[in-house]
Image: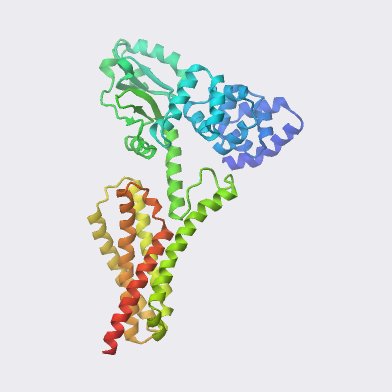
Amino acid sequence: MGAAVYHQLLLPDLKQMLAEDDKAGLAEFCNALYPPVAAEVLEGLPAEDVWRVLENCSLSRQVEIFEFLSLAEQVELVDKLDRKRLSRLVEEMSPDDRVDLLSRLGPERVENLLPLIAQAERSDIRKLLSFPEQSAGAIMTTEYASLPADITVRDALDRLRKQAPDRETIYYIFILGEDRRLDGMISLRDLILAKPDAKLADLMRRDVISVRVDDDQEHVAQELARYDFLAIPVVDSQNRLVGIVTHDDVLDIVQEEADEDAYRLGAVEPLEDSYLETPLLTIVWKRGMWLVLLLFAALGTSAVLSRYEEVSQKNAWLIWFVPLVIACGGNAGSQSATLLIRALALRESVGSLRVVGRELAAGFSLGLFLGGLGFLLALLYVPRGHAMIIGTTVMLVVVMGAVTGAMLPILFKRLGMDPALMSNPLIASLSDILGLLIYYNVAVLVLRLLAA
């Protein structure tokens, strides 16, 4: 069953247990259900009731469930805790998840909380919080398995048994030299299959694929997906191992990046939380800033129309076809922008000249078809000579829209900006301006030739 089904089935029973103060039932709820399912059901309760449920299980189980709640829900829940309970919760959390939470709490509250946390975790928190947001360092965990190179497989397995309870994953074991330098790695599978007296130095892989601590999280996700790793090591400028990024974190990154691109393609600044968890004023701001930009872009369309007002007055039929002309250019531009933004997101090798060639060819082919169709439709309203204006303009604006929509995301990428900032509505607005310029100039030229 899906999580939504569990939510519908279990939430009424959970509310009844809370009403009856059924501590045994609440403990069973926490311990019997898979943590993500329990978290899904709990998100339907007020913060006070969530803690009434969670206090019936061990701290480690509380943390397991808590980490599957959304960040917005986590922040709301910790607001109900005193410093002592919060410090114990944060200490128990995995390093990457607790840093995500603490980054939402604000510097002052974090500084007040840190003295109550054990020294080892405190140092780890400060280090992870110091890395730039959305970098490898900000999303990594420091709970990795490591061994020296000069021990046998038998000794390695003994040490791993002791490390395993405190590590996020032990499927990859990293071999460290002096000053925690990353010298190699070995998988748990290879370790189990190896002879007990073999040395790790003879078994480990020395050509370890790694990422730098300041690499962008999107690059980290692409590297891990490219090599089909379960985890990828994160090193500093001296090749010292500082952490690992695991596949479950990468899934979150991929989802986050896809969400950001989807929002920006629709001309909305990305939301940090889900739609319903985001305050209304925040949504208004994130939508409004784009709408203001598009408003000024639309003024360009009005300026072009006013410039050719005299032509429109003498040939009133030109106004009839303005929506058709600008729609063709805007739609073609939006299609090209979507294709190129996705190609750039997937790190495809996108050369400007090759893209221009492909879009010219595609735009010309589509333009010929749409221009011919526009010509035939225009014949229903205007003479053949005037219909030629419509057909020719539609062909030209489709070519223009295709090339413009493809090249602007590439330009943004070259400038070090997110290509998705070139949203479909913005592409459409720019195509409207250029399309109208083409339309009226073609019209003026053809009308002069017809009058000659």
State how many labels appear: 0
Q: Can residue 34 be seen in this view?
A: no
Residue at the right extreme of this rendering: 20
Residue 191 in the image: above or below residue 408: above
* Residue appearing at x 29%, y 72% in the figure: 368
In this orientation, which residue lies closer to the viewer: 403 or 205? 403
Tell me the quadrant of the picture where the N terminus can be found. Answer: top right
x and y, in percent, of residue 111 in the image = 53, 26
* Residue 107 in sight: yes
Residue at image x 41%, y 74%? 305
Q: Where is residue 171 in the image (x, y as percent from the top left)?
A: 39, 24
Hey, which quadrant is residue 163 in on the image?
top left
* Above or below: residue 329 compared with residue 313: above
Q: Residue at 42% of width from left, 41% of height from top?
A: 254
The residue at the far bottom in this view is 452
Above or below, 299 against 448 in this view is above
Front residue of 132/10: it is: 132
Up-down: is 401 above or below 413? below
